[in-house]
Amino acid sequence: MSRINNSQYGFMTTTDDIVSKRIGTTTIKQVEREAVMAINLSKFDKMDVGIAILDFKISELFLINFNDSPSFVRTVNQIDIHTPTTVIIPDCQQIEKLKFVLLSNLDDDVKQKLGKLKMFDPLVGREILKEHSLNEFNCNDLVAGAAGALINTCEEMRLIKPTNKFKITHVENRKFMLIDSSTIKDLELVSSSSDKGLTFFKFINKCTTKMGQRLLRTSILQPLTDVEDIKLRLESVTELKNEDQILFCIKSKLKQLSDLDSLFSHLLDDSGNQEQRVNNILLLKTNLMLIVELEECLNVNSPILQQIKEIFQHKNIGKSEKWTQWIFRCFKKCKGQNIEEVNDYVQKLAEEHDLNIDYRYDQIRGFYLRIKIKEKLTLPTEFTNIIHKKNIIECTTIDLLKQGSRLNDIVNEINVVSSSLIKELYEQSQDNLPIFFMVSESIAMLDMLCCFADFVNSQTGSYTCPEFGNYTHIRQSRHPIFETLFEFIPNDYSCVPELSRFQIITGANMSGKSVYIKQFAYILIMGQMGLYVPADYAIIKIHDSIFSRLSSDAHINTSTFANEMNDMNNILKTADDNSLLLIDELGRGSSLRDGFAVCLAILEHLTFLRATVFTTTHFQEIAEILGNKSCVLSSHMKSVEQYGKLKSEFKLEAGKLGTERYGINYAESSQILPSELITCAKELIEPLKSKSIKNDSKSMSKRRKLVLELYFALTQLKNLDCDINYKLDLLRTLQARFVDEINEATATN
């Protein structure tokens, strides 16, 4: 977590705060979230994009710039992350393609606005930013133009005032992984295809604050790519995981905190009524006291946690807490005396009339009585305003109404007396907003780290702290969600750039192919978030992006195959050597020959891209054809015939799938189709069998690949930092495998 030296937050939302009606509590009502995004494009064909996003819920202006792909993958990714309710783009010829992309990716209830080009003027934009920013900023012309257009539009829509100020946050896009929209949807990272579905966010979310939950969601959609930053998070998680008492103490304090982003942004607006302002100050005082107590819990050593502790120790935290003492004590003393008198009066009524009575307070009704009854009851004449409910009678008395009126008088007197003081406290609080917002960000990070530690401790399966290197090797890994639902078969992953960066997985239907490649994506995301992963051991190669083609769903106006080709086109244009590509059964939406040809052509092209690729297919010939390339590893999900039925063992094994015609075998064993149809299918398949590829060059190519694999494997084994006995086991396994495979290749020839 990097230090922040300036204030970052800002303006007021348009929805008024509502104070809780219940006596003794002061809370801010949650406002409906609204976010506005402005997108600015380069006038040339450079695909440079500048984006400004104003999030009203947390009063934050995000400024982002990057170079995008022709299909605007990164722009769509920002839409997925920030979920804007309004999008503004310049009205010019160059944005026609962007219009189409937005139309395809925005929800129907998102407003789209075209802004005149002069609204995106960068010079005007910088001046507007200076007027509205709380902290220093530095941005390029595209971002400045987008920010200016956004603020102007928000003023026209009366969402903000010309005097509003807000936090500015610069997002360094290169520090975060890009996860494309298809992957976010297919992995159900933050939303589910069904209302009752379990998302990855819900599964790991153990945050106790709104700030922590927002940061967790962002971290899932944008994992880190800097190894040192990831290691710092993991170090903190490890310390919290091992210190149960500290973790419990921190979480017990965190759950008492309000939504500080919302509270602090309210302090920027002093136009509310006096009661709201008093409540905001009281709520500020309560939260500052909790932060002081939270700092005392942080008896920690890891760098991130120590930095958070230092921020909580800032002198202005304690100073601000003292500013609110007078009004808090005054209000508490007067109100407490009034409540004590009401308690005595209600107790006297209960004893005098032998009734089970308690009381409530409402700003409109004042104090009123609640009498629990078991049978029909006639009340004394002093009880008035009687309301009959199930097993309860609500009523009041003249004396109780007087007490309610007295409480209102007390509040009004305090409001009058403290008006100038409240104004002064507001001004002093505004001066301290930089440290307040720094505290809010620190609490978000602390809450998320506690969430990670709590999550790992709550799991029954083994979780390990991942390491990072130039290759990926994961032993006995499991699907994080599925293993909690049923007995899950663990699998290994080994992905070395020179030998196995391209993995082709075949197998019978329902054998676990799709789960296997999705499981790898989950583990990668968890590791780069700074979270332990479900495995016995894991060393992970950092990836900058994840793209996938997993779902077979087609758009309304597009066929499955056309949708499939469109997704692959976007992947081919955007992916690079640091990307992870997940492709499930490519070519299934077309005829057998066309699907096979297109699938082979695309996959062969991807072998030259140097990206990490996991693909599943029922075209076993593709595994044979591409399997001779040095970077390709062919595997299959094991299935066996048992009692005449095909049984999937959900275990990955190297090489070609031994079971043939598993589709027909499954249909036959399941007895879904009539037996005469199965017999007919068996007769028809014989002439359709592909001719085997037999030539000496294929055998020679396979032997060369085996030697190359042995060379790289020995090199990796030499540099592997692990127990010597484990190295010896790996060496013996490597030797036996090489001998078997080289003999097999020679025998084939």
Image: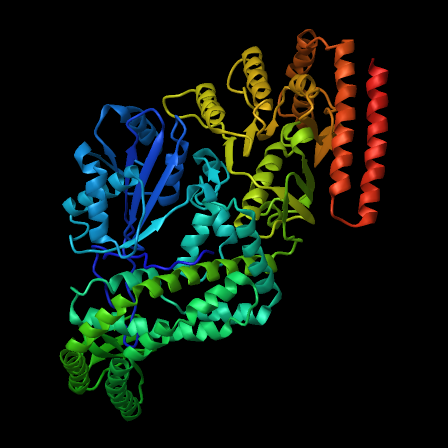
Image point (75%, 13%), residue name: 698
Using the rendered view, name the quadrant where residue 649 is placed.
top right
Outermost residue on the top side: it is 687
The total of numbered circles placed on residues is 0
Q: Which of these two is toward me, 551 or 341?
A: 551
Image coordinates for residue 136, horizontal then vertical, percent: 30, 54
Is 250 on the left-hand or right-hand side of 358? right
Image point (44%, 49%), residue name: 217
Using the rendered view, name the quadrant where residue 634 is placed.
top right
- In this rendering, is residue 269 above or below 578? below
Image point (54%, 13%), residue name: 591
Colour pattern? rainbow
Image coordinates for residue 250, horizontal then vertical, percent: 49, 69
Image coordinates for residue 8, horizontal then vertical, percent: 32, 56
Residue 255 in sight here: no
Q: Quadrant of the C terminus?
A: top right
- In this rendering, is residue 716 above or below 16? above
Image point (24%, 23%), residue name: 93
Image coordinates for residue 212, horizontal then vertical, percent: 43, 58
- In this rendering, is residue 441 above or below 515? below
Q: Which of these two is toward me, 685 or 418?
A: 418
Q: Which of these two is toward me, 423 or 260?
A: 423
Residue 28 in sight here: yes
